[in-house]
Amino acid sequence: QKEVEQDPGPLSVPEGAIVSLNCTYSNSAFQYFMWYRQYSRKGPELLMYTYSSGNKEDGRFTAQVDKSSKYISLFIRDSQPSDSATYLCAMSAYSGGYNKLIFGAGTRLAVHP
Amino acid sequence: SQTIHQWPATLVQPVGSPLSLECTVEGTSNPNLYWYRQAAGRGLQLLFYSVGIGQISSEVPQNLSASRPQDRQFILSSKKLLLSDSGFYLCAWTRDTDTEAFFGQGTRLTVV
């Protein structure tokens, strides 16, 4: 079983839709949860970062963590064509002197006008 | 401000040839450094990480090796490339105890 599972999509939605992206994980040692956005042929960029269970909101983006279910989500409201990208969830635990980052497979999102 | 440089951006190499990809970080000291590989349709696979000069840890056995000759320099190498080494290679760094990873722009390697 992979440590982090993420549906690779692709996911195609119309402009203005609410998008829900999800990941599950198996390692209860994960303490930090992140969402990265990656445009084609570019390196990933951090979008959202959360530490504890609950919701965190930043503009049109909401990150949700449920540690009891080992489940995290990213919601995008009023999606725009510029949101078209691959979204990767990532989780980390501090161990052995460094933060081991584990990524999901990434979900490819296409928002069409 | 901190920046990370990774080169080359694209590379086409024949099977059996050597490989050297370089990554440097500016504007910080003693970063944790990482090499990831991203295959088409798959997530980022951690290949190597380093917490200091000369300290390299490997996550998966493979045809690749890594070195850290200087504090802010991280090199990914291979003596003989395989077709299966094709992919998108990403270098990243984090501060000592922070979790946010900053990525380079990646190198797209095609082994032919």
Image (cartoon, coloured by chain):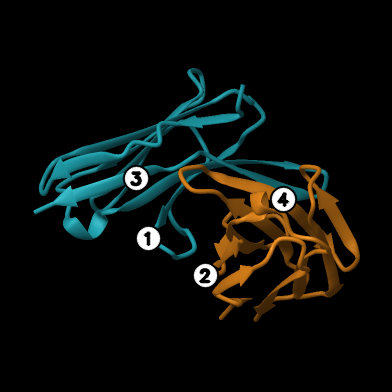
The reply to whether callout 1 and callout 2 are in contact (CB within 8 Å) is no
- Badge number at residue A108: 3
- Visual hue assigned to chain A: cyan
Identify the residue shown where x is 67% and y is 66%: B14
**Mark 1 packing: few (<14 Cα in 10 Å), some, or many (20+)?**
some
**Drawn side of residue B108 relative to residue B31, left or right:** left
Query: Which chain can be seen in orange?
Result: B
The reply to whether callout 3 and callout 2 are in contact (CB within 8 Å) is no
**Drawn side of residue B88 relative to residue B67, left or right:** left
- Badge number at residue B31: none
- In this view, the residue farthest toward the right is B54
User: Which chain hosts label 1?
Assistant: A
Amino acid type, residue under disc 1 in the picture = Tyr
Identify the residue under disc 1.
Answer: A39
Identify the residue under disc 4.
Answer: B47
Amino acid type, residue under disc 3 in the picture = Arg
User: Which chain hosts label 4?
Assistant: B
The reply to whether callout 1 and callout 3 are in contact (CB within 8 Å) is no
User: Which chain hosts label 2?
Assistant: B
- Badge number at residue B105: 2
Vertical arrangement, residue B8 with respect to residue A50, above or below: below
The reply to whether callout 1 and callout 4 are in contact (CB within 8 Å) is no
Q: Quarter of the image containing the C terminus of chain B?
A: bottom right
Label 3 to label 2, Cα distance in Å?
Answer: 18 Å
